[in-house]
Image: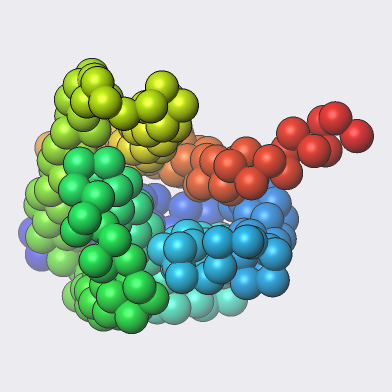
Amino acid sequence: MNSTEASTNSTTLEHLLWPLSIVDIFVCSINFLFGFPVHSYIIWFIVTGTKSGVASEFFNISLSICELLISFNCLLRILSSFVQLTALSSFLVGVTVAGRPLFQCLICVERYLAVVHPVTFLKYKPLRYRVICCTVIWIITFGSCLCCMSTSVLNTFIWFMWLFPIQFLLFLFVQLFCLVAVLRALKQSGPGERGRERRREESHAKKRAFYIILIITICMFISFVPYILAGVFVIFSKHNAETYSTFALVCSILGRFVHPVLFLHRTWKISCVCSS
């Protein structure tokens, strides 16, 4: 019984955390070949080319670093077909599990504060507060990486699958709260004594914040839910879920390209390329 359970856990982890099928290798290759240079360019552009400076884009830099690590992990998954890299690959899974959604939540909270509590937003806008927030999140991410690696070594997949949905629901609650609060602020009209042009600019900023939070929430939902459903299927059916995990991997990787598209659109890079 123990050997059968250990074998089931090992198979589950192999398909959910380190997929090695031909389709998975192809998807991971696409993510590495396109994701790594795109996010490297975003970091370089923020550091050297943004007018607003590094301080206002510090969360985007941290999120892009997470995406670089995830893209590198895709390369490790490909190489794990030939050499033993399971421990390192499982360690970097923690960036996907905690790092990326935490920084996405942080961006949503930032947009929420900018719209609903602008005075508080301006108070904590300096770079030192952003560095403190990012440091805390990186510490949490490192702990998540250790948990994922221990899951691989100790075959404690059941505990991982209980923690994963709870974490997802927490992130989803935070983002939905920010989304609803920004939507309520968007529906409220400004005071009558303000100028029309100022009200129009505020309305545009609120709409932009609302769309950013909405897109991030939808992408996180699409990225996380297939993995949760695949894990639940494996736990209750005791069969491997290669097809489900491949679909989940595709959804997760597609969600990783939304951040660079949003950033490039915001900086008008895509528009400049299309017009030229």
In front of the other: 216 or 142: 216
Measured from the top left, where is residue 176 in percent x and y? 19, 35
User: For the point 45% across and 63% down, which residue is it?
Assistant: 56
Displayed quadrant of residue 221: top left
Q: How many marks?
A: 0
In front of the other: 35 or 52: 52
Displayed quadrant of residue 247: top left
Quarter of the picture containing the C terminus is top right
In front of the other: 147 or 238: 147
Direction from residue 229 to residue 11 in the image, left or right: right
Direction from residue 263 to residue 201 in the image, left or right: left
User: For the point 82% across and 31% down, which residue is it?
Assistant: 274
Measured from the top left, where is residue 71 in percent x and y? 57, 61
> Is residue 62 shown above or below 165?
below
In front of the other: 134 or 267: 267
Displayed quadrant of residue 37: bottom right
The reply to whether residue 209 is in sight is: yes
Measured from the top left, where is residue 236 in percent x and y? 13, 37
Quarter of the picture containing the N terminus is bottom left
Measured from the top left, where is residue 140 in percent x and y? 23, 74
Identify the colour scheme used.
rainbow
> Is residue 133 shown above or below 113?
below
The reply to whether residue 91 is in sight is: no
Direction from residue 199 to residue 180 in the image, left or right: left
| Residue extending furthest toward the right | 276
User: For the point 80% across and 38% down, which residue is it?
Assistant: 272
> Is residue 208 shown above or below 84?
above
User: For the point 72% across and 44% down, which residue is it?
Assistant: 269
